[in-house]
Image (cartoon, grey):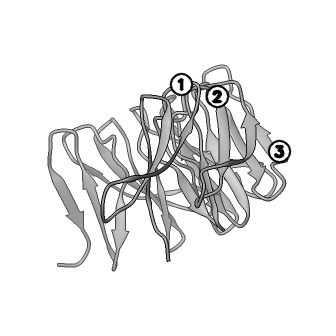
Amino acid sequence: KRSGIVFGSYDYFLYCIDPMTGKLIWKVETENYINGAPSISNNKIVFGGCDGILRIVDPLTGSERDTINVGVYIASSPALYDQKIFFGDYDGNLYCYDLLSGALVWKKPAGDTSGSILSIPAVGFNYVAVGNDDKYLYCYDSVTGKLMWRYRTNGRITGSAVISEGKVIFGSLDGYIYILRLSDGKKLWSFNTGAPIGSSPAVVDGKFYFLTEDGRLLAFGSK
């Protein structure tokens, strides 16, 4: 069984290397920087780049199966869920594409005050939650794209949220960690870390972890 490590680079290439030897298996050339990590699902690799193109490639050969020309920088990684691709762009637009056909399912255009979307959308339970440079966490119906709610923090949101147990966990550059109820965005808990948070949480075994921008790793949950 063949395996590979896949990553993008600022030299405009997506690489796949052998994890045992480090030897190149294949590479895909793009037209600008690749900032976000690729996503892999159902024998497809999906990634975007600063050339404004979302590419779907074969994991064995690196050959392009499809391209979606957005025309705006894609700085973050796409989320793949239920045969759909969810991703945001540098202008603040949010997209949902069908993974099988490449067709646009819905698009939420950036508003007048929207900033960049630098985080990976969190998808689950028919919701998609994503932070924005405009300091809001937005939550949409993942099927229709309808805005369900939004929650304002006092800082930009560059890290990704995580959906778990009917809740949304995320951090903000205002230094706070937030837990909101997924169904309506009501704040259930917050914690002031004393430093900006640009990272995404790791959630495992009833605990969650955040890295602050002053270099501390914080763990929450039962001891």
Q: Quadrant of the C terminus?
A: bottom left
Q: Residue 211 appears at what percent x and percent y?
A: 24, 50
Q: CB atoms at circles 1 and 2 under 8 Å apart?
A: yes
Element at label 2: loop
Residue 146: assigned label: none
Q: CA distance from mark 1 to mark 3?
A: 23 Å
112 left or right of 159 in image:
right
Q: Choose the circle earlier in sequence order: 2 or 3.
A: 2
Residue of label 2 = 52
Of the pair 62 and 134, the residue shown nearer to us: 62
Q: In front: 1, or 108?
A: 1
Residue drawn 26% across and 73% down?
221
Residue that label 1 marks: 32
Vertical relation: 90 (above or below) 160: above
Q: Position of residue 63 (x, y in %)?
A: 66, 49
Q: Position of residue 209 (x, y in %)?
A: 27, 61
Looking at the image, which residue is at 58% across and 48% down? 78
The kind of residue tagged 3 is Leu
Q: Residue at x 50, y 42 (%)?
A: 14
Between 14 and 162, the one lying in front of the other is: 14
Instruction: Please report contact status of discs 2 and 3: CB closer than 8 Å, yes or no.
Output: no
Pick the residue in front: 38 or 196.
Answer: 38
Task: Where is residue 5? Give x, y as percent.
Answer: 41, 58
Decide: is 106 above or below 124.
above
- Which residue matches tag 3? 104
Q: As shown in the figure, which amino acid type bears the numbered disc 1?
A: Asn
For marks 2 and 3, give the one nearer the viewer.
Answer: 2
> Which amino acid is tagged 2?
Gly
In the displayed structure, would residue 4 be above or below residue 64? below
Circle 3 residues within 10 Å: few <14, some 14–19, many ≥20:
some
Instruction: Report whether 92 appears left or right of 210.
Output: right
